[in-house]
Amino acid sequence: MVKVAIIDDHKIVADGLERLINESGAVSVTGKAYSVDECRKLLKTTPPDVLLLDISLPDGSGIELCPEIKRKYPQVKILMLTSYSELATITHALDAGADGYMLKNSMPEEVLEGIRVTASGGRFLCDHVSNLLQNHEKYSPEFTRRELEVLRYIKEGLTSAEIADKLCLGFETVRGYRKDLYVKLNAHSTRELISKAVEMGLI
């Protein structure tokens, strides 16, 4: 029986995955966590065979967590399960140590196959990601109007609280936009974020 842990900040997603996995008969969920910090605690107590890991978490990035997990728990296989389909994000995750990458709109059978393949030591990519990498397509990340507005205010040096006030949005909503911008532009600092945005002509 393959043991799986689910790390996703959306409880409804985590619960749905848990039901799917447990009903398969060959795989079981041994733990769930909803943040980077909770993931660390879970790994200390019950490290799984396969970790289903989202990228965007409330207190950090799943991609940034990969090297730490591989260093401390080399036996744990990491299967990224996310909605981010940009080529730069995919390659960044695989370079960080992920053993597989699949999108949240994958079919249930594909999710279970991904778990089985990574658990046995293979690398698994869902069909869309596999085609993207094989064809070397250069997808430019798409940005919403709100994300571009937030990006412009970041360039002006405004804090998340100040941006929220300017746009009449909640603080957590703006934090979410900032997180998405960092992932889409594969940036690790505000300076890098602005630099890449300028290079792409976004601001």
Image (cartoon, helix red, strand yellow):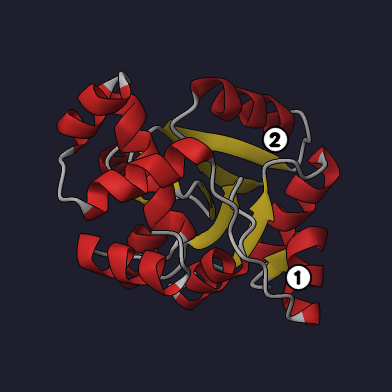
Mark number for residue 21?
2
State the image coordinates of residue 44 (x, y, percent, origin top left).
28, 48
Relative height, residue 37 to residue 74 (above, below): above
Residue in the picture at 54% in, 70% down:
88
Q: Tell me the kind of residue under disc 1.
A: Leu
Q: As rendered, which of 50 and 58 lies closer to the eye?
A: 58
Mark number for residue 132?
1
> Does the rendering let one see residue 180?
yes
State the image coordinates of residue 79 (x, y, percent, origin top left).
58, 57
> Does the rendering let one see residue 7?
no
Q: Earlier in the sequence, mark 1 or mark 2?
A: 2
> Which class describes the residues within 10 Å of circle 1: few (<14), some (14-19), or many (20+)?
some
Camera-side mark, 1 or 2: 1
> Which class describes the residues within 10 Å of circle 2: few (<14), some (14-19), or many (20+)?
many
Marks 1/2 in contact by CB < 8 Å: the verdict is no
SS at circle 2 = helix
Q: Tell me the kind of residue under disc 2.
A: Ile
Quick check: 110 left or right of 58? Answer: right
Q: In which quarter of the image is residue 85?
A: bottom right
Residue in the picture at 48% in, 50% down:
48
Residue in the picture at 21% in, 23% down:
165
Q: As rendered, which of 45 and 186 lies closer to the eye?
A: 186
Residue in the picture at 68% in, 25% down:
19
State the image coordinates of residue 183 (x, y, percent, origin top left).
43, 56
Relative height, residue 17 to residue 85 (above, below): above
SS at circle 1 = helix
Quick check: 67 left or right of 5? Answer: left
